[in-house]
Amino acid sequence: MRLTTSPDTFPVLSSRLFFSCWLALVMDKSTLSMQDLFKRLNHTGISVDISTFSKACKSRSLSMFEQLYRDLLVRLRRELPAKQLHPCPIDSTVVSLTSKLLWAQGYHQVKLLTCLESGCGATEGSLINFGYDHDANFVGDMLAAIPKNGLGIFDRGFAGLEHLQSAAASKQYFLMRIKSNYKLVFEGDEGLVRVGTGKESGQYRVVSFCDIENRAEYRLVTNLPGKGEWLVRDEEVMELYRQRWQIELLWKFPKMHLKLKRSMTKNENGIRMQLYVTLIAHRLLELVAVPKIWGSKRLDKLRYLQCCMCQEVSYVHWLGKLLVSWRRRVWPLELCASVH
């Protein structure tokens, strides 16, 4: 991972320090605000102040974050088999903006849409939208984000007759859940079903199944082949849709552990930076290797990194060193040795 901007470009706050501050804000759970971070930096020899950082968040380009995002994607995708269909769940998450300064600018929420490669944990084609636009308006952008040999899996929030037509016309494989109130009519001998009515209706392969426990019906539209050498059976289509849940787990992790629910800045550019850094941190946790005893999940890796970073400054280690020092001054050396 390289930061291409020269440190001489911003002598007061270099690109490396700027990115490091953002990464600390996102990944360090002991840092709850900018004030916490910069108090710590200022008292440990780094003389950058919070106002300089805030101005940089408002004025600097996103290109550095976008480049790091793309570089990490390349590293993650190297491990994927080239000739295999990869399920790619697609969904959005909403971050509420509570600052009155943002409300005055007309920003009440920001929506982050992304395509997740289940095989490697990479997030592709991430799209940031300020406002209340419906997910269905971004079907075209998300179809373009599906990688080669990928299967885009959409929830019913993206469903719409006109969007089904554009998805079917694309060269990408897709699997989309449609609403239960759409009219379905069987037509022809090929097993195709006409979905909807009017000019926007169309013929598609429809796979239906029921969840008896939750009393829910699922209607799935797909362009996966239903016959021939590359046949994908109805049962396999159902199992592929189940993998959409992986992207719900993706949103759960940054909201719980990478502070995605809380905006650190009060301007649009800074919020975009925070969202990019959150995705970058998520990718770094996929790539980093930690001792096996800690585990292999993202949360295990994050806990290991936080342990390494706070080992010299946590209350546990500080108190331990303090007690050892006190014992050596008060107790006989033989007693100290027996305590250890």
Image (cartoon, rainbow, N blue to C red):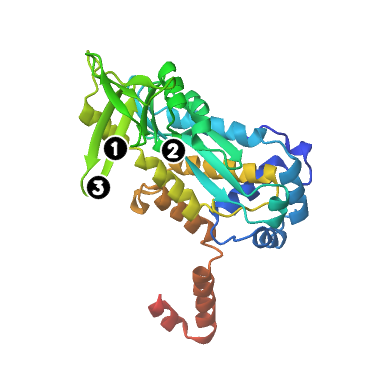
Q: In the orientation shown, which residue stands out farthest toward the front?
A: 198
Asked if 18 appears above or below 76 in the picture, the reply is below
In what element is the residue under mark 1? strand
Kind of residue at disc 2? Gly
**Mark 1, residue position:** 218
**Mark 2, residue position:** 157
Query: Along the line of sight, which residue is nearer the eye, 306 or 162?
Result: 162
First of labels 2, 1 by sequence position:
2
**CA gap, disc 2 and disc 1:** 13 Å
Kind of residue at disc 3? Arg
Report x, y in % for residue 97.
Answer: 62, 52
In what element is the residue under mark 3? loop
Query: Along the line of sight, which residue is nearer the eye, 128 or 86?
Result: 128
Kind of residue at disc 1? Tyr
| Residue 125 visible within the image | no
Quadrant position of the C terminus in the picture: bottom left
Report x, y in % for residue 255.
Answer: 49, 52
In what element is the residue under mark 2? helix
Query: Along the line of sight, which residue is nearer the eye, 279 or 187?
Result: 187
Report x, y in % for residue 106.
Answer: 69, 47
**Mark 3, residue position:** 215
**CA gap, disc 3 and disc 1:** 10 Å
Q: Residue at x 44, y 55 (%)?
A: 303
Decide if residue 209 is on the left or right side of residue 150. left
**CA gap, disc 3 and disc 2:** 20 Å
Report x, y in % for residue 300.
Answer: 40, 52
| Residue 32 visible within the image | yes
